[in-house]
Amino acid sequence: NQHAMETSDKIHQVLEKLDERSQDIIRARWLDDNKLTLQDLAEKYQISAERVRQLEQNAMKKLRTAMEAAA
């Protein structure tokens, strides 16, 4: 499916613009087969689960904005 491939490419291009921690959070929460919880990521980065949720939310907002701009 050509459209799905283009969408995937755009997502990866936008992901690369995010900082490394945000990229990792999005991948771990949404893209990996073995999805991590907020708590798993909080322990990994030594921050609160709420902070992980905020980072995830900000990254998703950036992804959405970029995808809308590219559409």
Image (tube, grey):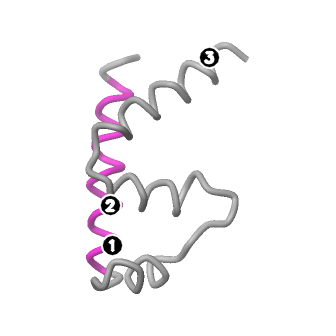
* Label 3 element class: helix
Q: Is residue 36 left or right of residue 25?
A: right
Please say whether residue 51 is one of the residues in the magenta stretch.
Answer: yes
Q: Amino acid at mark 2?
A: Arg
Looking at the image, is 46 positioned above or below residue 27?
below
- Residue 34 image offset from top left, x and y in percent: 67, 66
Residue at x 62%, y 16% (from the top left corner): 3
Residues at marks 3 and 1, CA–CA distance in whole angstroms: 31 Å
Mark 3 or mark 1, which is nearer to you?
A: 1
Residue at x 52%, y 62% (from the top left corner): 28
Q: Amino acid at mark 3?
A: His
- Residue 59 image offset from top left, x and y in percent: 31, 51
Residue at x 38%, y 52% (from the top left corner): 23
* Label 2 element class: helix
Residues at marks 3 and 2, CA–CA distance in whole angstroms: 28 Å
Q: How many marks?
A: 3
Q: Mark number for residue 67?
A: none
Tell me the crowding category of disc 1: few under 14, some 14 to 19, or many 20 or more residues within 10 angstroms, Cα based. Answer: many
Residue at numbered disc 1: 52
- Furthest residue in direction right, as rendered: 1
Residue at numbered disc 2: 21
Q: Report the front residue among 71 and 43.
A: 43
What's the magenta region? 50-68
Residue at numbered disc 3: 3
Q: Is residue 17 left or right of residue 32?
A: left
Q: Report the front residue among 31 and 58.
A: 31
Q: Amino acid at mark 1?
A: Val
Quadrant containing the C terminus in the rendered view: top left
